[in-house]
Image: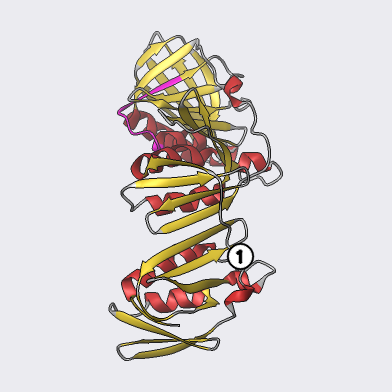
Amino acid sequence: MKIQVTQENLNKALSSVARVASTRNTLPILANVLIKTVGTRLSISATNLDIAITYYIGSKVSEEGSITIPARLVQDFVSSLPSGIIELKLDEYKLHFSTGTYRSTINGISSEEFPVLPNIKDGSEWKIESSLLKKKLQQVIIAASNDDTRPVLTGVYFHTDQGNLLIVATDSYRLAETTIKNVRNEVNILVPFNATQELLRLVSDYDGDVEIINNDQQVLFRVGDVELVARLIDGKYPNYSSLIPKKFLTTARLPKSELLNIVKVSSYFAKENAGSITIDVSEEDQSLNIHSIASQLGENIASTKGKIKGEGSITLNSRYLLDALHVMNGNEIIFSFNGKLEPSLISDPSDKEYIHVIMPLKS
């Protein structure tokens, strides 16, 4: 292999791919990235067996070839090089780098030992505009579980209903659902949380459509010159729709900035009490009050005015409420509940496609 690439392109590719390489895996080869020529391009790949990322960059290929080299080392090394052209030359299992006054060699392992990267055949193909997908993923992944004892809750659930795509995550204490309208394909896939995290990073600076191909076992997201493949979570997602309240006894329409601020202030006094804050809503005063107690430090009461119908109180985890508010973009928030023991619902009047449900704490 003998090629020339720009430092900027190689560094960007390695930064995207090397995160997936695992130094904790029992297979040492998984701590490496696979570098190989593909026609006139250079592909850089990494996998942890659950997800795989391949990044294609333009290059000048004089000789074809492939090799795997340590991901962390090559990423740190290339990021420290000056901008310009880098020449890569493979000599048996040694990859030589030269640019300007720099001459370096990284010892590699044969590409034949690298796991075969998945290739999805006969899958369903569909597209989502990247900025829309970014917004939707940001809204839901905050509610995904990190408890591996219930694998289905560690994923993000994509499924279609009546021509709309619903994206959902829940950890059983909170639930986030968002909708993308007019998706023609039938979709029913459960994507691992770490794959959606990587996908969110990839779409953050990309303009264009994200191409998606899935079958019953895997899903591929093509983001420009990058391909992310993930093994789907096997299992049936819970029937979450029955948990979403349809009618409410108490509803408060509030300025988002004011609600966000009083929840944040209240959370400082709730840290030693599992983030617990008690929310009281008064129709007579047209106000929402939050009470939080830190037994060793003191207590806090904060309030804001709004348009209130009904009254009552409920105790919630302040961190969950803050997470929900941070991903809502409108100027107002609608906060609704039916009593101390039933789920509360937070919604944005300017974005009717997103809802966030938070289960109450025992007060």
How many residues crowd around disc 1 within 10 Å: few (fewer than 14), some, or many (20 or more)? few
User: Between residues 288 and 135, which one lies in front from this camera angle?
Assistant: 135
The residue under the point 51% across, 11% down is 247
In this rendering, would 28 be left or right of 87?
A: right
The residue under the point 34% across, 18% down is 306
Tag 1 secondary structure: loop
The residue under the point 48% across, 62% down is 54
Residue 230: x and y in percent read 56, 52
The image's colouring method is: secondary structure
Whether residue 306 can be seen here = yes
Whether residue 269 can be seen here = no
Residue 97: x and y in percent read 41, 85
In the picture shown, does residue 217 fall above or below 328?
A: below
In this rendering, would 234 be left or right of 82?
A: right
Q: Residue furthest right?
A: 149
The quadrant in which residue 117 appears is bottom right
In the picture shown, does residue 145 fall above or below 5?
A: above
Badge 1 is on which residue?
Answer: 116
On whether residue 329 falls in the magenta region, the answer is yes
In the picture shown, does residue 338 fall above or below 155?
A: above
Q: Which residues are magenta?
A: 326-335
Residue 232: x and y in percent read 61, 46
The number of callouts visible is: 1
Amino acid type at circle 1 is Val
User: Between residues 164 and 131, which one lies in front from this camera angle?
Assistant: 164
The quadrant in which residue 27 appears is bottom right
